[in-house]
Image (cartoon, rainbow, N blue to C red):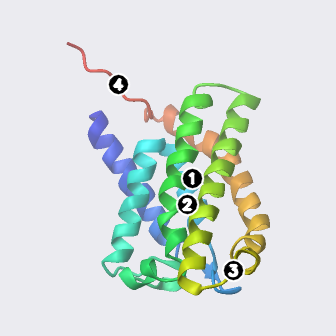
């Protein structure tokens, strides 16, 4: 299979995984706990920064045009324009940063360096997600920083730590299985 075709297929599969997992949520306040961050981090780490970000963009665009893939099976541009829109938009840098740090620092390494790069990328990406989402939430809701952090960040820290731990464990395992099946994630240079 050509590299481009393979990447498109893997990207579509990860976009589908995000679309299936993201609507599953637990409403605990103005921002529900969703499996979207898990799926986005997984896509970024497994596919790399470029294809993981594209898979995430596909998910966001599907939700924006009306496919019910956002938390609680919601959809539409009004969701992105609403209080949680910054978190949805923040999935893009989450995938990008998670994948980029892993691509640069850990994908070709073994042992602790590989796992540390996975964790570091996801923690940095999650921090950017929280910053974008909280600023957006404050602008739309009119709440101050303290109240916004209490509503939109603090309740999610334990769950996001668990998601990061799970992605850190499963990504190398799935990569290894796919590599054994002949699926690699490095671009092959064309022979001239």
Q: Nearer the viewer, residue 178 or 128?
A: 128
Occupied quadrant, residue 176: top right
Q: Residue 69: give x, y in percent of width and height.
A: 44, 76
Q: Residue 83: give x, y in percent of width and height.
A: 54, 82
Residue that badge 1 annotates: 42
Mark before the other along the chain sequence, 4 or 1: 1
Mark before the other along the chain sequence, 3 or 2: 2
Q: CA distance from mark 1 to mark 3?
A: 32 Å
Q: On the rendered structure, is 6 left or right of 42?
A: left
At a point 67% along the width and 36% down the height, the residue shown is 117
Q: CA distance from mark 3 to mark 2?
A: 30 Å
Q: Is residue 90 above or below residue 106?
A: below
Query: Do labels 3 and 4 touch, CB within 8 Å?
Result: no
Query: Do labels 2 and 1 touch, CB within 8 Å?
Result: yes
Spot the residue most to the left.
192
At a point 71% along the width and 62% down the height, the residue shown is 160
Which element type, helix, strand or loop, lies under badge 4?
Answer: loop
Mark before the other along the chain sequence, 3 or 4: 3
Which element type, helix, strand or loop, lies under badge 3?
Answer: loop
Q: CA distance from mark 2 to mark 4?
A: 26 Å
Q: Residue 14: give x, y in percent of width and height.
A: 45, 56
Which element type, helix, strand or loop, lies under badge 1?
Answer: helix
Residue that badge 2 annotates: 39
Q: Residue 150: give x, y in percent of width and height.
A: 77, 77
Q: CA distance from mark 2 to mark 1?
A: 5 Å
Q: Which mark is residue 144?
A: 3
Q: Which mark is residue 188?
A: 4
């Amino acid at each position: 299979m050509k590299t481009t075709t393979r990447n498109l297929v893997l990207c579509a599969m990860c976009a589908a995984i995000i679309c299936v997992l993201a609507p599953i949520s637990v409403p605990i306040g103005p921002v529900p706990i969703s499996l979207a961050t898990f799926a986005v981090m997984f896509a970024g780490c497994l596919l790399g920064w470029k294809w993981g970000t594209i898979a995430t963009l596909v998910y966001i665009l599907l939700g924006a045009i009306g496919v019910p893939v956002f938390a609680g099976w919601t959809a539409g541009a009004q969701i992105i324009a609403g209080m949680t829109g910054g978190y949805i938009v923040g999935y893009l840098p989450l995938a990008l940063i998670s994948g980029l740090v892993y691509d640069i620092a850990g994908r070709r390494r073994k042992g602790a360096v590989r796992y540390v790069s996975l964790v570091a990328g996801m923690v940095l990406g999650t921090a950017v997600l929280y910053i974008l989402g909280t600023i957006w939430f404050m602008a739309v809701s009119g709440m101050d920083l303290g109240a916004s952090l209490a509503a939109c960040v603090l309740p999610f820290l334990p769950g996001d730590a668990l998601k990061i731990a799970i992605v850190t464990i499963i990504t190398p395992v799935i990569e290894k299985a796919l590599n054994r099946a002949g699926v690699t994630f490095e671009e092959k240079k064309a022979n001239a």
